[in-house]
Image (cartoon, rainbow, N blue to C red):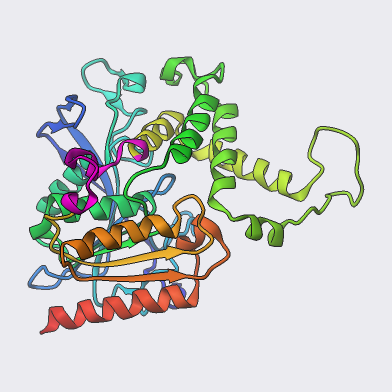
């Protein structure tokens, strides 16, 4: 039985593409598959489609649950569903696992038809531009020429921005949440430390660990722990864990003593059980490489000059990884081009992860935006 507001049991689908996918690096996949899910119904005019782009460790499973695994809830289920801010009674919502992923789309663990073995280390380095190209092909197959909106948080927001730049005629609205126009040196450094944790794991074997039946679990655990620290604010961690000792007293050892240590180890262990190490390397590198202004001498205003979509840009005050100042750079660049942009900076204590949480002010803002989008479709 569905919970109120749930899209219900999700049905993952696979779309096979026989035509080659050319990557920004020059590499080519002769054929590939994309795993995706849809929620709601496409209207007769095919004008009410919304693409939701996922961040680092998420997937096509955006909302609802699986009939055979009801505890597996979509990563943005609090945002998407009947009566929710992105209302599936009004919009046809698409979630897709990007190429290079580990949730059904062609990625490093997939079998390379040329060798009969997993791609492993030979899988091409992917970029945000490559993902948007693949998503546009999926939209073509689904008969969607123009999206009512493309939406995402963090890395997903970069994809929404790239959609507005690359396919301005195919996107009416871009919802850009907890974003940055490019990573800072500090952010690239965090990603490199996480990658080093993986690549120096003795079980990594240069990325070709599949045939050996091993997983670089220790590296994945450390990578997740490093990342998770950066997704939360200092205040959020203090409020959630403080300096609480698990046993109530100092035990003078190097095993788990503090609650926060236990939490990080739990998150690391869980992550290592479901995520692929090569995919982690690929996705963090895609984050590093995203820089639309790079082709315009560093001028973000020039990079966004081709965008015609209306923008909603949202940031969170406690997000120190992708700070509010970085979102304001996007807003300024859009205003330089006299584009239609709305901006909200929400005072929330949860850090970068705030975009995934059910903050009532944040959700009310997104709801109001989609109500306007719906009215425009009806007019």
Question: Which quadrant: the C terminus?
Answer: bottom left
Q: Residue at x 55, y 26 (%)?
A: 197
Q: Camera-side residue: 303 or 33?
A: 303
Residue 150 x %, y %: 24, 60
Q: Residue at x 11, y 34 (%)?
A: 18
Q: Is residue 157 magenta?
A: no
Q: What type of secondary structure mainly makes up the magenta span?
A: helix
Q: Is residue 291 magenta?
A: yes
Q: Camera-side residue: 1 or 138?
A: 138
Residue 143 found in image quarter: bottom left
Question: Which quadrant: the N terminus?
Answer: bottom left
Residue 244 found in image quarter: bottom right
Residue 89 x %, y %: 27, 77
Q: Is residue 218 left or right of residue 309?
A: right
On the question of residue 120 being in view, the answer is yes
Q: Residue at x 31, y 22 (%)?
A: 119
Residue 198 x %, y %: 51, 26
Q: Please determine whether, in this image, residue 254 is positioned above or below residue 7.
A: above
Residue 304 x %, y %: 18, 54
On the question of residue 143 being in view, the answer is no
Instruction: Report the magenta residues as a range.
Output: 287-303
Q: Please determine whether, in this image, residue 103 is positioned above or below residue 12.
A: above
Q: Please determine whether, in this image, residue 86 is positioned above or below residue 274.
A: below
Q: Is residue 125 left or right of residue 215?
A: left
Report the label total: 0
Q: Residue at x 58, y 65 (%)?
A: 349
């Amino acid at each position: 039985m569905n919970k109120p507001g749930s899209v219900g049991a999700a049905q993952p689908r696979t779309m096979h593409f026989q035509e080659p996918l050319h990557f920004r690096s020059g590499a080519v996949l002769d054929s590939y598959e994309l795993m995706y899910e849809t929620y709601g119904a496409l209207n007769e005019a095919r004008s009410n489609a919304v693409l939701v782009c996922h961040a680092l460790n998420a997937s096509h499973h955006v909302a609802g649950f699986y009939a055979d695994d009801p505890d597996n809830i979509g990563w943005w289920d609090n945002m998407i569903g009947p009566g929710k801010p992105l209302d599936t009674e009004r919009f046809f919502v698409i979630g897709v696992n990007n190429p290079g992923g580990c949730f059904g789309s062609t990625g490093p663990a997939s079998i390379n038809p040329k060798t009969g073995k997993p791609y492993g280390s030979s899988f091409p380095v992917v970029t945000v531009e490559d993902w948007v190209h693949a998503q546009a092909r999926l939209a073509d197959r689904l008969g969607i020429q123009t999206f009512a909106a493309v939406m995402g948080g963090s890395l997903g927001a970069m994809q929404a921005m790239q959609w507005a730049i690359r396919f301005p005629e195919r996107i009416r609205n871009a919802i850009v949440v907890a974003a940055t126009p490019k990573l800072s040196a500090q952010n690239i450094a965090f990603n490199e430390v996480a990658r080093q944790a993986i690549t120096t794991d003795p079980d990594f074997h240069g990325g070709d660990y599949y045939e050996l039946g091993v997983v670089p679990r220790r590296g994945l655990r450390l990578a997740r722990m490093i990342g998770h620290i950066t997704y939360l604010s200092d205040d959020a961690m203090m409020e959630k864990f403080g300096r609480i000792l698990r046993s109530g007293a100092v035990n003078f050892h190097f095993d788990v003593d503090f609650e926060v240590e236990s939490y990080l180890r739990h998150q690391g262990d869980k992550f290592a059980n479901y995520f692929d190490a090569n995919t982690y390397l690929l996705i963090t590198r895609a984050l590093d490489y995203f820089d639309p202004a790079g082709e315009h001498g560093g001028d973000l205003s020039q990079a966004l000059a081709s965008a015609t979509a209306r923008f909603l840009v949202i940031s969170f005050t406690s997000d120190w990884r992708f700070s509010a100042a970085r979102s304001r750079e996007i807003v300024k660049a859009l205003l330089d081009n006299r584009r239609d942009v709305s901006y909200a900076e929400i005072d929330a204590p949860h850090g970068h992860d705030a975009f995934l949480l059910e903050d009532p002010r944040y959700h009310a803002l997104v709801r109001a935006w989609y109500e306007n989008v719906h009215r425009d479709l009806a007019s």
